[in-house]
Amino acid sequence: MKTRLDAYWFWSRLPTEKDMRDQLRSFRDAGFVRIYIQARLSLSREIYLSVGWLRAYATAVEIMSELGLKAGLYDDYAWISGHAGGRIVDGAEHLRERHLFWAGGTGAELGVDEIEATLGASLGPAARHWMHEDGTPLWMGWKIVAAVAERPHGPEDITAQVRLATSGPEGATVRAEGLPEGTRWTVFLAARSSTSRIPDYLSPEAGRRFVEVGLTPYASACAGHMGGTLDRLFFDQPAPVLYDWPERFGNLRNSLAWSDALQAEIEAHGPLGPQLLALLRDLPEAPAIRSRIYRAVTGRMQTAFLGALRRFCDVYGLQLSGHEILPHIASFDLSGGFTSIDPRAAMAADFFGTDRYRDVTAVDANNLEAQLAPLLGFGIAHASGRTGCEVELYLTSERSDVRASGQWELTPAALRAQMIRLHLLGASRIILHALYENDGDARDSALDNLRFDFAPGYNFQPWWPVMPALAREMAELSVFLENAKCPRIAILYPYETALAEGPRHAHATRFGAWCRALTEAGVRPLVIDEAGLWRMTAGEAVMLDGAEIVGLVLPEVTHLQTAASADRIDVLRARIWVEDGPPPEGVVLRTLLSECTGVPLAEAVPGLRQLSCGRDADGWWRLVLFNEGDAPCEVALAFESGFCLRAGDHAHRPVQRATLRLAPQQVHRLRLKPDAAAVAGSTLALGAKPLTEVMVLNGGWTLATTGTARAVSVGAGWQVQGDQAFSGCGCYETTFHTDRDQELVLALPELACAARVSLDGALVGGCHHAPYHVPLGRVAEGPHRLRIEVMNTGANRYLCGSRFAGTGWPDASGLTKAPRLLDKR
């Protein structure tokens, strides 16, 4: 089965052809399908797009072709798409980003200074020096755009009374003449950054130059593979730098990208100053003005940048994928991730509009919790006629305040659990961030040292041999999820409300609360845009793009783009359940879902995540149960009319109630079909019963890590027995004696973190997630030699002596509790 796993491949230097071939073969054998080469901040910008770079890149793509891999073209240096490693603005100062700033007060003089970059700049000096020359945003070409006095009768344009008093690289001041004392006024100033390498995303010329300078060289270098082996272009977070400064105030929380063309478009609707003030103050016409201006900004960015990418892909036969900044990253709250930004200023709110440029819907996800991104991506993809979205998964540190240092402590169990969550929420493919060309060095520096560039580098994890099993399991889960259709609760993405009210409005948390509540209850809602209201058709059932809609949630929707949409919602209220309040809790919500959707749901128990996927072509309901907890759980399914249950290839007799026992981290993929032949009161119990302990393997153990095997305790990990900085594979061995033939299972409680097990010289299996059980098969009476090869994470090696280690180092490694033999009967 073709897997659903792709990856970035981080380069900090130009690898040799042999290294490329060895690593790419390893990636293919681990289950990866598409590889995106990515130049990182640890690679000199002078190398990026050089003759040597393009030659090495083309060699790698040729090797991918030979190995049957696909290549994806990641479109830039590091991760803000559109600057071509700074080459777009080299010799073209007019293409550097330009921004609108403002200040307000009652004095005769106002100013803007101490301008700071947010978001990316917060990742440290390497990011700051990449985004800005010498790491500092400086400014040129200061210009007064408008000035407005706030009068009792409304805003009054006073631009003619204001002059530029001082201006320089760090800011500007203006002075107003003839204002009555105490008058509150606001000035709007535009300036171009003289040091930013980020281009003017409003400029079509910048978009064309990016294709010419940043993409066409790849098309020339890989001419024989464009549209074949190299089949996809991926963009990543194209956005102006989002600036903040002490004098900023009002509803707009960052500077606004600015151009003369945008100014002219705004002025076509009336005096400029009062319109700009409406972006900040809650004036009577503010909602409509904000919507129009922010839509204009976003539309111009999409046309200038995404339009240029679209044309490039069309010429060379590539699919266009990628994602914008997602302010909800790692959260369900629409603004709960990147809280320092205003999405309206960053092409980071019109998710459905951006998708119209893509062939493949993509989002990114951060760290190891359920979150909104794949669910929102699923809805966006559905509106474009696609099944699911691809999800880029990256990790940031939770043991250090330097987030970019990543998580070398990631275990295969944690990765597996998160990939399961992402697929249940709507992912069809996952892009891992990342595979490394090398493992960097010991410097305590993030981003400019590949070792600490959003670690881990998966191929440098000791548990890398587990990856093929993870890839296969996720592919099987994806296929199971996708081959079913389900009645949906639709949730309106309140874009117009977001434009009018801003990211701190209640819609952001209400939207997230509904998405979280529904997914935790076991259904995947369908996020729709306002246009989706109009695509709904009402025959025997309300249908939207092939999905039956049985309910509609309006999360604190205060504004719609057209008044007719409100009338449309009123029409839908007569056909389906419509809710604009908070989500109900517990049993009330589950009862509501059962009545609306008719989908089968297991009872809610702690630690259980479930998804009722819908009916397949044969009429079977599909249900996935995942025990994401650390303890076994028992789950009940009950239907008065009776049902037949199929687990794997085995169909069980019709019953009215089934009880399923799930071990920790176990996944059940079930099929259910109503069956009235069930006998009243009939029950069925499924799942492994607790096994009987035969013996505890306490003593006689040896361990070999970096040298000769030595006697060790298996009551504690090797990190407290002389190997605190060892990351790799440790080989434990012992002998045991059985007094009779029996079917045995080896239990490795609290294993850290993956194992391969051999009995009497023959490999019998392995484990990489709880409950850490390995079937040994039929074991004959007599003495036996047991060998357990344990792989830990890279944390103990790579964090040794590092300021990124936190207080938990060294991490538990190896056998931390005595293994047990269990009787399988």
Image: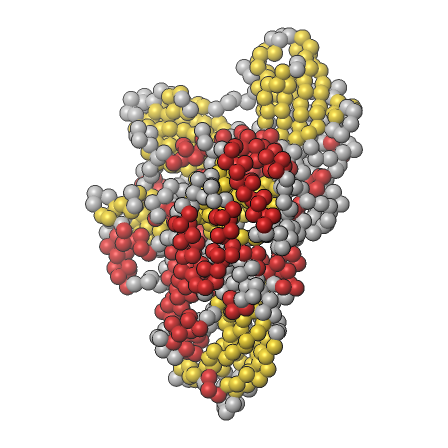
Rendered location of residue 818, percent (x, y): 69, 25
User: Image point 59% across, 52% down: which residue?
Assistant: 50
User: Image point 40% across, 57% down: which residue?
Assistant: 307
Extreme-left residue of the structure: 539
**What colouring does the structure picture have?**
secondary structure
User: Image point 34% across, 45% down: which residue?
Assistant: 385
Q: Quadrant of the N terminus?
A: top left
Q: Which is more toward the observer, 818 or 622?
A: 622
Rendered location of residue 661, percent (x, y): 48, 27
Is residue 484 something that shows in the picture? yes
Lateral position of residue 624 relative to residue 769, left or right: left
Residue 400's place in the image compared with 184, above or below, is above
Q: Which is more toward the observer, 52 or 810?
A: 52
Q: How many marks?
A: 0
Rendered location of residue 285, percent (x, y): 36, 73
Residue 219's place in the image compared with 497, above or below, is above
User: Image point 72% across, 18% down: which residue?
Assistant: 734
* Quadrant housing residue 439: top right
Rendered location of residue 247, percent (x, y): 56, 74
Q: Quadrant of the C terminus?
A: top right
Lateral position of residue 742 relative to residue 593, left or right: right
